[in-house]
Structure formats: structure tokens, C-alpha cells
Image (tube, helix red, strand yellow):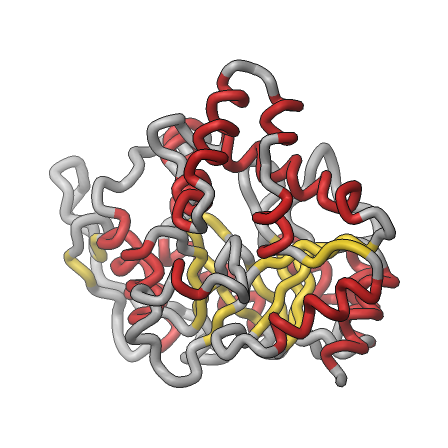
Amino acid sequence: MRLGLTFGYWGRGPSAGFVELAQEAERLGFDSVWTAESWGSDAFTPLTWIAANTSRISLGTAVTQMTARTPTATAMHALTLDHLSGGRVILGLGLSGPQVVEGWYGRPFPKSPLTFTREYVDVIRQVLRREGPVALDGRYAQHPYRGEDGSGLGKPLKPITHPLRADLPVFLGAEGPKNVHLTTQIADGWLPLHWSPYNHGVYADSLRDKPEGFRIAPMVQVVLADDVEQAMFPIKAAMGFYVGGMGAKTKNFHADLMRRFGYAEEADRIQELFFEGKRDEAIAAVPSAFVDEIALVGPADRIRERYAAWAADEHVTDMIVTTRDLTALKLLADLANG
């Protein structure tokens, strides 16, 4: 199982010491480092900064939002950074939800997310292969554009720059069952926001057709501390926000996922409390049992014990960890190296 380190997206400003931490992860033998974006910092710029200060570690976006850029613009970012880094990019894509797409990016949320995703990846693949001009007459992606409000002068183009790798890996961050199944058909890997090595049934049907070599790289929060419940608090805080407020009450992909994990009543309660403005109570309503399934928390001996379940999971090829604790990174590196 490969190890990756994710920095997520920035809060009020740049994350202190992220370059040095990426360098240490590379020294410890981590396979990849990842950045993200939401509605603040972008994913590519910090990753470029890391690329300039490392030499081996793979560079992934987990995720860059598809609705933020046209597929050709995203392909340009990826092929440019792939050249500058010597072929180290993994392009992780995600759709986000209606509140972000329409509220931040100011465009309609796709009525057919599966079609949107399929067309988006198709265009990126065409750019990277550079076998000819990009051409697609899709529902969402039109190359050249044929809308009535266009000039009619568009022509099919292929990238001026020759991509370094036609097979640059494309991963998708998907949550819904149909989206996960589509990911196994059109992408090289999947970035689950939550995964449990104790509960494979959640995704069993979606993964039924995954091809050989398909990578599954879940995000796993790691908190090294003596007090297990205290270690769980920051994870519960994040879960309370994602399940309670990251989306509308009637359309929240994170809440839906928690329900599929078997915590339907708890997800409903978290949403109710969050929308009532009772955020502390919403956080407290996140069940410890759920956190324990999807994260690694507690003292070193406990993390060693629970890491074994992840290492034995036949589906998981990569573990992308969230931590700023150098001691935790060293512990994970030791575990991964046997």
C-alpha cells in the first residue's frame, strides 16, 4: 500500500511549513503529496511550489474542481506541471455540489453529473493523447463550440505543447454509487473521501467491474494522541460541517454517504442540529464508531493495530493521510515499510 500526504486547501492563508513537510514525506518514502481547492486557494499553485522543492514524490490534486475550469484549461494545467516536474502529476478531479458550483462558480450544477464527468474526462484524455484536434459534440462539452450565442468561427485545435505523458493518471473523487462505478470505467483511480476497511459492502456493487491496476486511494485522517476521544474531536468537527452544512439539507452528498455507511439516523440528526445553528451539538452527534472506521486515531500502539486492517484491505492501493504531525508521518512510514 502506497502512502500519500494531503494538505487539503488553505484556510485564512497559506499552511505554514507545507513545503518542508512535503520534503520530509519524500525523504520518508511517501509515494505522493496532494493539494485541494474549495472556494479559496487553488490546487495547482501550491502543488507547483512543492514540485519545485522536491524531486521524486508524485504530485496529485485531490481534488481540483471540474466546474472551476473548462476541461481544456484543466488539461493545460496538468500537462504544464507534468513537464515542469518531470512527469510526476496525478490529476484528481471532482464535481463538488450545487451550493459551490452555483454559489461560487456561478454556473448551473449539471442535471446529468455522470454525462458531465464522462465528457470532461474525454476531453482531457484527447488533449493528453494529442492524436488530433479536440473534437466532441457533447451535452456539456462542445469542441468547437456550436451554441447559438457563438460566432461560428471556432475550429478544432490540438495543444501546441506536446504533453509529456499521454497516459498521465486521472483520478476521480466520487461519492454516489453510480459515480463510483463510472469512475472505474473512465479513470485510473478513485479518491474516496471516506473508506472503511471494515465495511466493504458500501461500495461492493460500484466496484464490481473495476479493471486490473485500478487504484483506490482513500483519504484517512491520522491523529496521534493518548486520549482517543480527544483525538477524534477535530475529525468530528470536520464531519459535522461536511454532513451538516456542506450542501443543502435536501441534497448533501456527504450526508448521503454517511447514511450508506449505516448511520442514517445520526446523519439526519447532525443536519437538523447544524441547520438550527447548534454546531457544537452537531459535532457531538457525530458517532465515534464512524470516525474509528474511517480514520486512525489514538496512541501509537492503537494506530499500529488498526493500520493492519488497512494494509490487509485488498481494495486499497494507496492511503492518503491528513496530518501535520511529523511523528505520525514517521510512524506510518515505519508501518508501511514492515
At a point 55% along the width and 57% down the height, the residue shown is 62
Is residue 143 at all visible to an observer of this figure? yes
Q: Quadrant of residue 155?
A: bottom left
Callout count: 0
Q: In the rendering, at what x and y percent does residue 194 appear?
A: 52, 54
Q: Is residue 228 left or right of residue 267?
A: right
At a point 60% along the width and 75% down the height, the residue shown is 88
Which residue is more in the foreground, 265 or 283? 265
Which residue is more in the foreground, 158 or 174? 174
- Compared to residue 292, the image places residue 96 above or below, namely above
Q: In the rendering, at what x and y percent does residue 132 appear?
A: 26, 75
Q: In the rendering, at what x and y percent does residue 74 appear?
A: 44, 57
- Compared to residue 142, the image places residue 165 above or below, namely below
- Compared to residue 324, the image places residue 14 above or below, namely above
Q: In the rendering, at what x and y percent does residue 35 appear?
A: 62, 55
Q: Quadrant of the N terminus?
A: bottom right
Residue located farthest toward the left when viewing the structure as drawn: 148
Q: Quadrant of the C terminus?
A: bottom right
Q: Is residue 197 left or right of residue 305?
A: left
Q: Is residue 83 left or right of residue 65?
A: right
Is residue 84 at all visible to an observer of this figure? no
At a point 28% along the width and 56% down the height, the residue shown is 178
At a point 62% along the width and 76% down the height, the residue shown is 311
